[in-house]
Image (cartoon, helix red, strand yellow):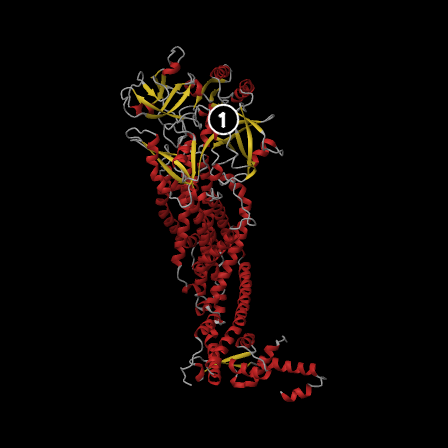
Amino acid sequence: MKFLTRQEEMILLAVWQLGDNAYLVTIRQLLSRITAKKWSMGAAYVPLNRLFQKGYLQDRIGEPNARRGRNKIKYYRLTARGTAALEELSAMNRALWQDFPAAAEGKESV
Amino acid sequence: MGRHGITPPVFATWLLRMILPADEIPYLLGDFREEYVEMFSRMGRMRAWFWYWGQVLSSLPLFVKDALCWRVNMLLKNLIIAARAALKHKTASFINLAGLSLGIACCLLILLFVRFETSFDDFHEYGDRVYRLTLELANEESTQTMAYTMLPLGPALDRDFPELEAVARMSYRNALFSMADRDFRENLFYCDPDIFDIFTLPFVEGNPASALNDPFSLVISEKTARRFFGESPALGRTVTVNTKTPYTVTGVVADVPPHSHLDITILASFASLANTERVKGEYWDRIASDATYVRLARGMDPEALERKMPAFLRKYRDFEAGEDMILHLQRLRDIHFSRLGYEMARTTDPGLVAAFSVVALFILLIACINFMNLTTACSMSRAREVGMRKVAGARRSQLIGQFLTESLIMALAATAVAVLLVWLALPYFNRLIGRTLAFDPSRDLVLLPGLMALVALVGLGAGFYPAVVLSAFRPARILKGRPWASVRGRAFRTGLVVFQFAIAVIFMVSTIVVYNQLDYLRSRDVGFPADEVLVCWLWEDPEPAAVERLRRELQGHYAIRDASAAFGTPAGSSSASRTYRQEDRPQEQGLDMLTIFTDDHFLDTLGLPLVQGRNFSRDFPTDADQAYIINEAAARALGWDQPVGKRLFSDYRAEGTIIGVVRDFNFYSLRMSIEPMVLTILPEWYNSMAIRVQPDRAADAIAFLESRWPAYAPRYPLDYHLISDEFRRHYTFEQRLGTFFVCSSVLAISISCLGILGLISFTVVQRTKEVGIRKTLGASVPGLVALLVRSYVYWVLAAFVIAAPLAWVLMDDWLSSFAYRIDMGWTPFALAGAATLLIALATVIWRALRAALSNPTETLRYE
């Protein structure tokens, strides 16, 4: 498996969490909320696009909402490959974090 | 919150549009806008505005970096594809590369030459304000402009026009420089001290302000200093000039670069000439061998100065009716390309530079056309690749980008090879054109960017057409196996090939005509046996008695038929033009005629027959100072049928009678027609000795001359040449032009042939199946070859029809510069046409034959 960067990993997880409503705006807002850091649009878009190019994500064009004017929405969803990568990552992380005291707590909070 | 009420900052949005990936713009702009609107409704306009700008600015670098990443990635992929394509078609790639690099190399060489020729005198600090005065002489019949002016002109200008910052005369001589142990024959310029304010000649030693103030001072170049004095210091040393006068070295200047119109190695102070016969008095009538240079003040209008010249001249000189003299100002940078009489500068015919540039351009064009045709033809086999990529979603711009990358790489490789070729060929090219060009990209700052520009020009120019054609393929057609059905522009490519061959035909015709003309000049009778006459230069100020002693001694030798002392020998450089008035028209303006001062042996030495009258003879005492012999051209110019016995008055002698008429002979070169000429005896002027040798005894004669020479001129090296060699020297330029044309036409023909080789390969691939089917149905091999080749014959014929009239006009123009010229006739055209057709056919038939001989089962196997 190819390693993902931390940002890519976070974006993949965010897309998974957001389900059918994953697009740049929601992804960025979710990440900003969880990490308590300011993610700029570019900082979110670049890894998102890279994941898309690598085939971890697929896109779907949806109708615009009221705030966007006439600009359509590009929604993202995990591909089979993206899901597989997340599963692999999670298994690896569990193995790596195995005996770390706070690991159990962290698991519940996610 | 109205739907249209809130729009994000316009300029920031524009910035985003510029930088975002093109196909993502609508979604991303939407994302930005959505958040902006949300921000606006929650926190108000100000905060939203700041937020938006903050987002844009912090995101921009990330977007840019991302975009660059993909570009580089794309480029690397394209490079790999290009390498694969090139390796797959090894022969085609090689032909392509070879043609292109030959073309570029040839173009580079010529551009180096053109740059050198146009860079003359660009190193003078005040160059844009320096002018040379030229003199236009006009009478009823003719006008002539010369680079030489009158001696008093310089000082008079200096007096009358204080606004001139510097005025200097330069007088060109040749002299003998003697050190204690060695002698050198060198060219020198006598010049006024202001010369260092006009030309930029950096002093290594000495003081420019005073170096040429005193008589008998010398300023020499570093190279000359080393030749004269070796490594020891030159300043203050003494050199004897012409075995008489000691001169002191008062300055050493840096060597003058090769792109200077004057080859300045030695300068002497003009004051040294003060007491010589020539300089005394105010000779406003006589044109001296001096050029006058001036430096204008900043902002001064040269034309305004020129307009003041007529009045200025009339102040000093009286004019006769019908006679006129006009002074012009010639820009320093124009001197190298000027064509004036009595020129001491190194000049080049601007037409030649233009011709070279045009040839360079055409060769590069032929090479580029070739590249286009070959790439298009050989990429047909890549149609499937294009189809697959299109099906897989490649956009047309991406395909064009890929093909352009490939052609740029080819151009880069070809330029690299061309640089190597230029480096190898430069010494030969220098010898061919008689220049010292340098090619050093590491030191030459213009060269590298220039080469890069050339790569871009050739790569994009030649790659554009194939890229557009190939990327236009429709995938459905390609994958069905018929890509070319959709390819238009066949006529365009045919047109290009016709154009290539037309140029090749023009080059070939020119080559043949130049060679015919040279041959004609070489073999034409000049009117006397030029290959049996030696000319040797006499020493400085020879005693007439000593010259006569030497002449008699030479004449007595068994290998020498006759000898004659003279001022003015055929094909030589020294000659005098004198003014004559006729006895029956004494009031009229005189006639200028070329005058040779010689003795009673001149006609016998050159073997010139008399048409009327008699030769000079010692039996007639008046012959010594009152007799003229004229040539037939002079008799015509004077308008006398029976000139013998008629009297002439000249500007150097009051009385004289014509005693004979000599048959016309060529004096300068066959470029010029025969001029009116006068021979007379005047021993004080002799500067050379003409010696007619026995045909097979030239070596004996030269040995004898060498053995006797020291007795007459111990310090002067013996300097002799055959007149026929000297004549030939006049044609070196034509000779070089000839060689140059041979090279370029060979190059043009071979590159064009590579081009049609590529095209026929394309046709053959296209018609493989047709050939196979025809063969199975019983077509013969010759019939098939004819089928494939026929159209090429038409193309070459079309090229010939276009090229022949153009070539005729061009060469007729060139030939018209010769007084004795060949008639072009039809042979050069027939030869060039036949040769082009044959070479082209041979190339094409070779490839067609291979296709016609192929086994139909092979070609039809996949059907």
**Image quarter hosting the N terminus of chain B:** bottom left
Residue at position x 56%, y 79% from top? A38
Q: Is residue A78 above or below residue B827?
A: below
- Camera-side residue: B767 or B317? B317
Q: Is residue B249 above or below residue B18?
A: above
Q: To which chain does the residue with label 1 belong? A: B
Q: Is residue B180 above or below residue A4?
A: above
Q: Secondary structure at mark 1?
A: strand
Residue at position x 50%, y 74% from top? B56
- The answer to whether residue B857 is visible is no
- Residue B50 screen position, x and y as percent: 49, 77
Instruction: Tell me where residue B713 sits by quadrant.
Output: top right
Instruction: Tell me where residue A100 sits by quadrant.
Output: bottom right
Residue found at the very far top of the displayed protein: B619
Instruction: Tell me where residue B482 sits by quadrant.
Output: bottom left
> Which residue matches tag 1?
B721
- The answer to whether residue B496 is visible is yes
Residue found at the very far right of the displayed protein: A99
